Image (cartoon, rainbow, N blue to C red):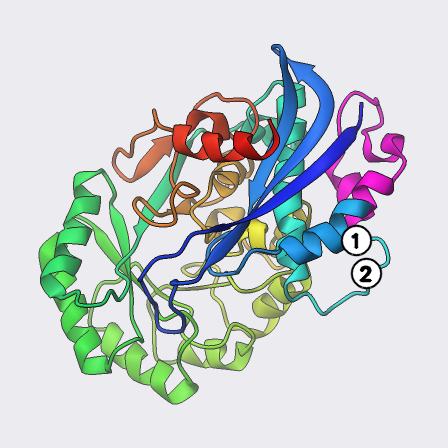
Amino acid sequence: MRIIDICEVTKPISSPIRNAYIDFTRMTTSLVAVVTDVERDGRRVVGYGFNSNGRYGQGGLIRERFRDRILEADPKSLLNDEGDNLDPHRVWAAMMTNEKPGGHGERSVAVGTIDMAVWDATAKIAGLPLFRLLARMKGREAAPRVFVYAAGGYYYPGKDDTQLCAEMRGYLNRGYTVVKMKIGGAPIDEDRRRIEAVLDEIDGAAQLAVDANGRFDLETAVAYAKMLRDYPLFWYEEAGDPLDYALQAGLAEFYPGPMATGENLFSHQDARNLLRYGGMRPDRDWLQFDCALAYGLVEYLRTLDELDKAGWSPSRCVPHGGHQMSLNIAAGLGLGGNESYPDLFQPYGGFPDTVTVEDGHIVMPDLPGIGFEGKADLIREMRALAE
């Protein structure tokens, strides 16, 4: 049993949308295939992965650094103790050979993308959905029913409040009970008007979360906090720079409601510092670490260990990214749910074709691996790469 190839292609996921910090007109993602010599049901086992939106494709790092370290390693060194499957932790260690600690940057995205594909292959070889494999590894029961919320509400060229409200109404019609919109890309009075328009539209049938994408300095973050506390929001997300823990901690003095952050922290050390110095409150706040951007599930398990040491429940984690990898982690390891992009970043966002949202939750299908094969438009892209 061995990995015989790792393929990467950089694909566009461009869109005219923007948030408070960036637009997505030139956004890309890396699609990766980890090809094994194992066959299941007459087909060679190939694991697939891709990086989350908001960070560009990492083809250079994948092809020039991390791919070759795996392919040049002794194949037996990448297997579990029984020799009957891959060991994602050992594959991860091979990728990180000769890498200094710290300086996470874009390499965390490259490693996380390959790591996703390795876990997909590992679960397929085991003949299990990844969420069931993870639950078994941790000696716990899987929870196939997962909370999901609909992320959208971006700033579009020419988009007015009517269109914004229609978008949010569409999410409610699909079964979502929490919707999210962007703030910080317009003056505060305009954002207040947009928020009130959406709240009037959903009229208590759902809750609203708002996301500033790290745009604010402390003064602006506090001004928004004072405005936002007038409304019954699900959360106030990423007010300032993700590494400005003092800003995040200071907000708690002005915003008693739930806050969320963490999607732009890329290691368990960064997560630990957020919990130590960021003033996050385990009884109400939410953590959004995204394994696909943060060295993958191997590192995410270390992050969950840090949460446990700090007295946080994994149920306070609702990862960023809207991908099926985090859905499997949520179902297998007891996270609080997952982000969802019903319309954006296709074909990479969303669920398998048979999955529907009911009362803000989905039920995981029993598909081997991450479940990409259940999403027709996505698996076509993937198989074109390596099958």
Identify whether 210 is placed above or below 2.
below
Q: Nearer the viewer, residue 254 or 370?
A: 370
The residue located at (44%, 28%) in the rendering is 144
Quickly name the residue at label 1: 96
Q: Which mark is residue 34?
A: none
Q: Secondary structure at mark 1?
A: loop
Q: Secondary structure at mark 2?
A: loop
Whether residue 305 is visible here, answered yes or no, is: no
Q: Is residue 153 left or right of residue 307?
A: left
The residue located at (68%, 16%) in the rendering is 39
Q: Nearer the viewer, residue 62 or 365?
A: 62
Question: How many other residues sit within 10 Å of disc 1, few (<14), some (14-19) or many (≥20)?
Answer: some
Identify whether 278 is placed above or below 309.
below
Specify the quadrant that holds the N terminus: top right
Residue type (three-letter) at the residue carrying disc 1 = Met
Q: Nearer the viewer, residue 386 or 281?
A: 386
- Relative image position of residue 293 (x, y in whole percent): 57, 55
Quickly name the residue at label 2: 99
Q: Is residue 59 left or right of residue 316?
A: right
- Relative image position of residue 231 (x, y in whole percent): 20, 68
The residue located at (21%, 38%) in the rendering is 174
Q: Is residue 296 left or right of residue 290?
A: right
Write down the region rendered in magenta.
69-96
Return the residue found at the far top.
42
Residue type (three-letter) at the residue carrying disc 2 = Glu
State the separation of the CA atoms marked 1 and 2. Answer: 5 Å
Q: Is residue 21 magenta?
A: no
Q: Pointer 1 and pointer 2: residues touching (CB < 8 Å)?
A: yes
